[in-house]
Image (spheres, rainbow, N blue to C red):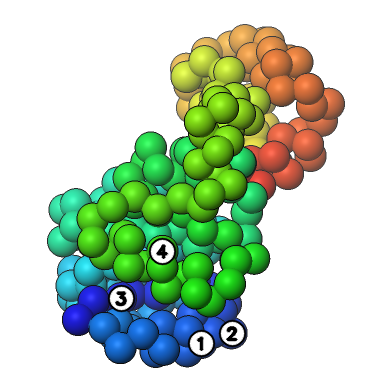
Amino acid sequence: MTRILIADDHPVVREGVRRILQGAAEMEVVGEVGRSDEVLEAVRKLKPDVLILDIGMPGPNYLDVLAGLPAAGGARALILSAQPEEQHAVRALRGGATGYLTKGYSPPDLIEAVRRVASGHRYVTTALAEQLALGIVEQAARPPHEQLSKRELEVLRLLAGGLSLKEIAGRLGVNPKTVSSFRARVLEKMGLKTNADLVRYALEHHLI
């Protein structure tokens, strides 16, 4: 019997996934959580074989959750997301996920994905596999913030978190003019214009 934990912040999605998996005799949903900061504790407590994980839940970034899975019990993670494969799949797989499926696929696809992941094999859709073979997704999967230096990324996160240049300077131990220069470089590299653009980008890419 394959034990499954569902992690998604939408109750209707969790219920839908549960009903789909009930159609497979060898699968048992052992629990559900609605926040990413609840996932690792649920994994430790319930010991699922497969974690079905959404990437946009409230709480810590999903990559942090993936990084914590080995210490929590080692459940294999299948990402089930509304986000396009070409934007997040490679990052998720590199981060420790065993499979990636978007919510636009059919119930049989979900069951097949769970079976593949539970058996220890990676799961990607045929469309994604073809793109990976052609090297298309590798390039598309690199978001603009990956061009930033470590310090520039830190400044981006602090700006997106609402801190002023003076507050950031105090936290980093530098002059406010230096922070202003970092901000200008971040905006230029990412093709953005305002702090509001930075906040929107950081939220969309789960950087804060």
Relative depth, front residue between 110 and 60: 110
Numbered disc 4: secondary structure: helix
Horizontal and vertical percent position of residue 206 = 56, 47
Q: Are marks 4 and 3 in contact (CB under 8 Å)?
A: no
Numbered disc 1: secondary structure: helix
Q: Amino acid at mark 2?
A: Val
Q: Amino acid at mark 3?
A: Ile
Q: Are marks 1 and 2 in contact (CB under 8 Å)?
A: yes
Q: Are marks 4 and 2 in contact (CB under 8 Å)?
A: no
Q: Going 32% across and 68% down the picture, which residue do you hit?
A: 115
Q: Going 36% across and 85% down the picture, which residue do you hit?
A: 24
Q: Which residue is mark 3?
A: 4
How far apart are the two marked residues, 1 and 4, measured between alpha carbons? 18 Å
Nearest to N terminus: mark 1 or mark 3: 3
The answer to whether any part of residue 62 appears in the image is: no
How far apart are the two marked residues, 1 and 2, measured between alpha carbons? 5 Å
How far apart are the two marked residues, 1 and 3, measured between alpha carbons? 13 Å
Numbered disc 3: secondary structure: strand
How far apart are the two marked residues, 4 and 3, measured between alpha carbons? 12 Å
Horizontal and vertical percent position of residue 90 = 48, 38
Q: Amino acid at mark 4?
A: Ala
Q: Which residue is mark 4?
A: 113
Q: The C terminus is located in which quarter?
A: top right
Q: Which residue is mark 2?
A: 12
Rendered image quadrant of residue 131: top right
Q: Are marks 1 and 3 in contact (CB under 8 Å)?
A: no
Q: Going 50% across and 74% down the picture, which residue do you hit?
A: 108
Tag 3: Cα neighbours inside 10 Å, few (<14), some, or many (≥20)?
A: many
